[in-house]
C-alpha cells in the first residue's frame, strides 16, 4: 500500500458517487470517509458531522484563514465545499481515506499527494440519464439543478484526466469496478 492511501471519487453532481461511496464503505471496513465542510444547507436526510460539517459562510471563511482546509472550491454560486486537513492527515497512515469531491478538488488532491492518491471518475451513462437522476433525487430546486447541469458539461470533459473511469449504469457493476480499482491501489 502507498504510505498514505487517499481514494477520491469525483463526478458531476448526480452521477452517483455518494451512492457508490456508501456501498464501498460498507464493504471495506478499513476505509474511512472524509467528511467535507460545506456552506450549503443540510438536506432533510443529512446529519451534521456525518454527511458534512455544515458551516455558516463566516465560519467556513475562518477555517480557510486558519489554514484548516486541504482544498476548497466554490462549486456552485455561493456554495463552498472543502476537505478539512484533519479528515485526511490525522488519520492513521495505514488507514485509507475516501473523499467525495468535485473535479477541481480532485485536481488539487492529486497535485498535493501524487501517487498516494487514486482518483476515480464516476461517469453517468449519458447526459440525459444524469439529468433524470438529478431531477429524480428531488433534493434541489430547478434553478440548482440547472446550475449543476451547466457545470456537469465541463466536468464530463475531464473524465480522461484522472486515474480511472467507472461508468455508473448498473449500480452493482459500478460498485464492483470501483472496489477493484481501490483494492488494486491499496495492494500496490
Ligand atoms: N446506477 C444507478 N442507477 C440508477 N439510479 C442511480 C444509480 N446510481 C445512483 N442513482 C441515483 O441517482 C441519484 C444521484 O445519486 P447520488 O446522490 O449518489 O449522486 P452524487 O454523484 O453523489 O451527487 P452529488 O454530487 O450531488 O452529491 C440518487 O437518487 C441515486 O439513488
Ligand atoms: N472540492 C470539493 N468538492 C466537494 C467537497 N465535498 C463535496 N464536494 C462536491 O460538491 C458537489 C455537490 O455536492 P452536494 O452534496 O451538494 O450534492 C459534488 O460534486 C461533491 O462531490 C469538498 O470537500 N471539496
Image (cartoon, rainbow, N blue to C red):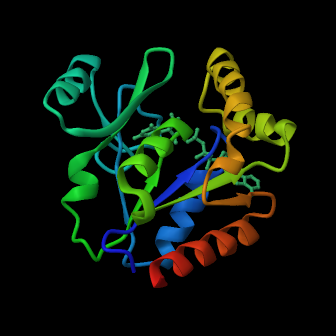
Question: What quarter of the picture does the N terminus occupy?
Answer: bottom left
Q: Residue at the spot x=70%, y=19% of the render?
A: 146
Q: Is residue 58 above or below residue 179?
A: above
Q: Is residue 88 above or below residue 85?
A: below
Task: Answer with the quarter of the image where residue 154 lies.
Answer: top right
Residue 41 is at least partly visible in this image: no
Q: Residue at the spot x=47%, y=85% of the render?
A: 187
Q: In the image, is 111 to the left or to the right of 180?
A: left
Which of 182/112 is in front? 112
Where residue 91 sits in the image (x, y, percent)?
A: 23, 64
Residue lying at the far bottom in this picture: please name it. 187
Task: Answer with the quarter of the image where residue 127 lies.
Answer: top right
Residue 12 is at least partly visible in this image: yes
Which of 48/36 is in front? 36
Q: Is residue 146 above or below residue 181?
A: above
Q: In the image, is 71 to the left or to the right of 149?
A: left
Q: In the image, is 166 to the left or to the right of 132?
A: left
Where residue 134 sits in the image (x, y, percent)?
A: 70, 36
Q: Residue at the spot x=37%, y=56% of the render?
A: 113
Where residue 8 sits in the image (x, y, percent)?
A: 49, 56
Q: How many marks?
A: 0
Q: Is residue 7 above or below residue 28?
A: above
Q: Residue at the spot x=36%, y=49% of the render?
A: 112
Where residue 49 sits in the image (x, y, percent)?
A: 28, 47
Q: In the image, is 66 to the left or to the right of 75?
A: left
Amino acid at each position: 500500500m502507498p504510505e498514505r492511501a487517499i481514494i477520491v471519487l469525483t463526478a458531476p453532481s448526480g452521477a452517483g458517487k455518494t451512492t457508490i461511496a456508501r456501498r464501498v464503505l460498507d464493504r471495506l471496513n478499513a476505509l474511512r470517509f472524509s467528511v467535507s465542510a460545506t456552506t450549503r444547507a443540510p438536506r432533510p436526510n443529512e446529519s451534521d458531522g456525518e454527511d458534512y460539517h455544515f458551516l455558516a459562510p463566516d465560519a467556513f471563511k475562518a477555517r480557510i484563514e486558519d489554514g484548516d482546509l486541504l482544498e476548497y472550491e466554490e462549486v456552485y454560486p455561493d456554495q463552498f465545499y472543502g476537505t478539512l486537513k484533519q479528515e485526511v492527515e490525522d488519520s492513521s497512515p495505514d488507514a485509507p481515506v475516501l473523499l467525495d469531491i468535485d473535479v477541481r478538488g480532485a485536481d488539487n488532491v492529486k497535485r498535493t499527494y501524487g501517487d498516494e492518491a487514486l482518483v476515480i471518475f464516476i461517469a453517468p451513462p449519458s447526459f440525459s440519464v444524469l439529468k433524470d437522476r438529478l431531477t429524480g433525487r428531488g433534493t434541489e430546486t430547478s434553478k440548482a439543478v440547472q446550475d449543476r447541469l451547466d457545470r456537469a458539461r465541463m466536468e464530463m470533459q475531464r473524465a480522461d484526466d484522472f486515474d480511472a473511469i467507472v461508468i455508473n449504469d448498473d449500480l452493482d457493476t459500478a460498485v464492483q469496478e470501483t472496489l477493484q480499482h481501490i483494492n488494486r491501489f491499496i495492494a500496490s
